Image (cartoon, rainbow, N blue to C red):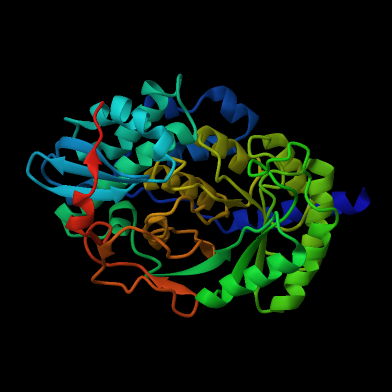
Amino acid sequence: MIRRIMKTHRRRFLKASIMAGITGMTAIATPVVFAADRPRRSSRSRNPRYGKLDEILRQPVLKREFFSEPVIIESVELLRFGDNFLCRVRSRDGAEGMSVGHSGLKVLHPLFVHHLQPFFIGKDARDLDLLLEKVFIYNFNFRYNGISIGTPLATIEFAILDMLGRIANKPVGQLIGRILHPEVAVYQATEYREKSVEESLELIKRDVAEYNAHAVKIKIGGLMFMTKDMHAKGPPGRTEKMIPLIRKTFGDDMTLYADANGFYEVEEAIRIGELLEEYRYGFFEEPVMFDWYEETRQVADGLTMPVAGGEQEYSLHGFRWLIANNGLEIVQPDTYYFGGMIRCMQVARMAEAFGKTCTPHMSGGGLGFLYMMHFVSALPNAMPYHEFKGLHTSVQFECKTSPLKVVNGKLKVPTGPGMGVDIDPDYVSKHEKLKA
């Protein structure tokens, strides 16, 4: 107990030291006030940090100054070829943008065509910040939330950003910030939790070697939604064996992370976290269920290592609580699940204000790695490494400004307009338009 109290005090001391050096954020543009984000006095009285976070949420992300005239959205289309999806957006002036949809659209596409598609038609794309806010707060939050609305919404946002980037002749990173990271160093995200320690190790070594990764994240704990056994808790002792073995295998120069996907309860999470600390892992991701906010903070207070999370979080208000109350040191919004880059940048800005870092979670196949790269390119408080699950995709495209290959553990961010890639017209023609 004394050790845990000392850890908590040390953690708070480190936070206080970080806070002393923070001078605050400078607004990028004239604030746009959204009614749903107005701070409430009761929130401020409970925790003075909320006032600063609410001020950050008022700042727009999209750089409207690149567009002197309205960009009215004429059409929003969802195209399907098997389980592959494309979103195509066109303006009244003939500009076009395209994105690759998340694999989850095979079950979520009705929300796209019945609700989101008609909402965006006729709107000014320059108002993208406000449109996203309106979707989440006023239009659908009472009936749909989380991944179900975030995933199709992000698909539309990516296409709109691609279109706007082509109009302004700017890469997406310049539309939502300034280019700070022309290259993105990646950590190899691994799975294999259901396999034996020995088999897992060989597969992890294979993945790391394929991309010459300088950082790797392993899965710990038992199986979650993937398991068919309702009572499975994972092979006994597997985690305790994996943690030191991975460090021994890759040596002291390899950066290591661990992800429990919410498997543990507080006391067990702290026990496992102390083992991770012993073997110098860089962060502990989702030690308890993502929406156990108070329990997440308890784990964080019981450890000196950073606790990371947010891949399943769908609420700006939820991130606001976790940041204000030191539940997380590293925020990990998913660019698809959370509804796109603009909302993810709002989370990153809140985290930056209190000396916390951000590394986005990367889900889905397709061009998920591309959207991660563009977001990270403009991320002011980026972690040294970012999630990567390989370049394997069935999407046929051309990129003229980047080989889109991992070289010495890094990816070069495309510098062309929009997303910087052109999807093969013949590949697009295989897709059929989905109708409401």
Of 413 and 206, nearer the camera is 206
Q: Is residue 375 above or below residue 293?
A: below
Relative to 366, 332 lies left or right: right
Q: Nearer the viewer, residue 281 or 79?
A: 79
**Residue 153 location (% of width, % of height):** 36, 37
Residue found 74% across the figure and 36% down from its top: 230
Q: Residue furthest top?
A: 142
Residue 35: name its quadrant.
top left
Pick the quarter of the image with the C terminus: top left
Which residue appears at 73% of the width and 58% of the height?
A: 305
**Quick one: 43 or 436, which is closer to the camera?**
436
Residue 80 seen from this side: yes
Residue 108 versus residue 266 in the image, above or below: above
Q: Position of residue 378 (x, y in %)?
A: 38, 59
Res 188 quadrant in image: bottom right
Q: Position of residue 302 (x, y in %)?
A: 80, 49
| Nearest the eye: 157 or 343 | 157
Task: Indicate left or right for 270 with 86 as reference.
Answer: right
* Residue 163 visible: no
Report x, y in % for residue 143.
Answer: 45, 20
